[in-house]
Image (spheres, rainbow, N blue to C red):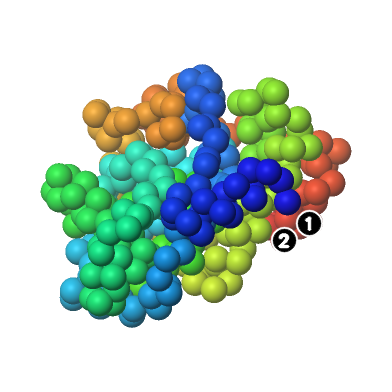
């Protein structure tokens, strides 16, 4: 055990605090598109027994009605899909909110934790209330009935999301695994091709697990760019919404849109306001070995 871990162990036992490294600032040029695989959450101070999660009562605990979550890898075209969904009169699709990064802690030594435990509310229950309220506030401001959230990191938090909103609807956006890996490597050249391939595979494996457990609607970036009208009609059917042709010309939803570092892709294709053709797919020889199994599973080989 390292000296820091030993120190943290003793500190947690006696004070409820731990020493944590201050993260280095991200490069502004790469911060937005590159949603790194989340690191494990820091352990919470363990002072009282954990409160079991209570069953969510939508009438009491939730303000949102059937929120929509897009689960997708980084560099998969999810910002395009978000903009198109946001052009629908019934859907508000905000920028990437990184919602599950909002965590609740109790002040060390205060009676707050016991008080909320008496109410049957632990850390995760309170986080669920906070997440729901934050999204609901954004939705009310939009004047629309349903919200869409598409932060790629949500792919690793699908269980928490499904527990928080039992009525959530899930959309799975796939793209050729080697194309995703290629795009991520090009966006961050100091990441090797092998590292990019291994990391995007983690997103895809999490998506597979989530779909097996939750079900939902699957669409591909390639079909979305080749025949957007057909893909969006089918998606609207899944969401119990009428198809609106304005989704194809999403330029109106660019007004006031938040794009850039940490919020989603911001390249010229997105800013054009219309769907642009996809790049040629990687050749078989260009597919990293680690991605070949997923390419087969998703029908790209």
Residue 165 as seen in the image, left or right of residue 188: left
The picture quadrant where one finds residue 127 is bottom left
Examine the rendered structure and indicate whether residue 83 appears above or below residue 26: below
Q: Is residue 23 visible?
A: yes
Q: Is residue 247 above or below residue 120?
A: above
Is the C-beta separation of discs 2 and 1 under 8 Å?
A: yes
Decide if residue 200 is in sight here. no
Farthest front residue?
A: 14
> Which of the two residues, 277 or 151, is positioned nearer the viewer here?
151
Q: Answer few, some or many: residues within 10 Å of disc 1's Cα (few below 14, many 20 plus, some between 14 and 19).
A: some
At 54% across and 73% down in the image, what residue appears?
213
Number of the label disc, if any, that sits on residue 189: none
Foreground residue among 127 and 131: 127
Q: Is residue 258 left or right of residue 183?
A: left
Residue under pointer 1: 293
* Quarter location, residue 261: top left
Residue 39: image location, x then y, percent: 58, 47
* Residue labelled with disc 2: 297
| Element under disc 2 | helix
Report x, y in % for residue 227: 49, 46
Residue at point 23%, 76% (across, down):
119
Q: Looking at the rendering, which quadrant does residue 266 occupy?
A: top left
Mark 2: give few (<14), some (14-19) or many (20+) Cα within 10 Å: few
Q: x, y (%) of residue 106?
A: 32, 57
Residue 156: x and y in percent read 54, 56
**x 63%, y 26%: residue:** 188
Residue at 64% x, 50% y: name it.
Answer: 6
Q: Mark 1: which secondary structure?
A: helix
Horizontal placement of 184 versus 119: left or right?
A: right
In the visual, does 81 lie left or right of 1?
left
Tell me how far mark 2 sits from mark 1, CA to CA.
6 Å
């Amino acid at each position: 055990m390292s000296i820091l871990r030993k120190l943290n162990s003793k500190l947690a036992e006696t004070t409820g605090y731990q020493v944590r490294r201050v993260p280095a600032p991200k490069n502004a040029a790469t911060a937005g598109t590159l949603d790194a695989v989340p690191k494990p959450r820091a352990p919470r101070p363990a002072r009282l027994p954990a409160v079991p999660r209570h069953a969510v009562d939508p009438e009491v605990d939730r303000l949102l009605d059937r929120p929509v979550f897009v689960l997708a890898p980084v560099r998969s075209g999810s910002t395009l899909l978000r903009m198109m969904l946001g052009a629908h009169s019934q859907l508000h699709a905000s920028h990437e909110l990184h919602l599950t990064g909002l965590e609740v802690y109790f002040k060390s030594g205060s009676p707050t934790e016991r008080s909320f435990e008496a109410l049957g509310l632990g850390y995760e229950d309170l986080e669920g209330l906070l997440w729901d309220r934050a999204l609901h506030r954004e939705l009310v401001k939009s004047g629309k009935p349903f919200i869409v959230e598409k932060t790629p990191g949500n792919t690793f938090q699908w269980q928490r999301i499904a527990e928080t909103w039992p009525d959530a609807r899930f959309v799975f956006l796939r793209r050729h695994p080697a194309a995703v890996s290629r795009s991520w490597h090009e966006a961050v050249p100091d990441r090797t091709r092998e590292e990019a391939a291994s990391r995007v595979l983690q997103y895809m494996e999490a998506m597979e697990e989530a779909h097996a457990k939750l079900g939902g609607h699957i669409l591909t970036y390639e079909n979305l760019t080749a025949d957007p009208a057909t893909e969006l009609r089918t998606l609207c059917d899944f969401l119990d919404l009428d198809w609106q042709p304005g989704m194809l010309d999403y330029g109106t939803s660019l007004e006031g849109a938040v794009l850039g570092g940490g919020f989603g892709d911001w390249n010229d294709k997105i800013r054009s306001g219309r769907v642009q053709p996809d790049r040629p797919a990687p050749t078989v020889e260009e597919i990293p070995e680690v991605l070949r199994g997923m390419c087969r599973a998703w029908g790209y080989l």
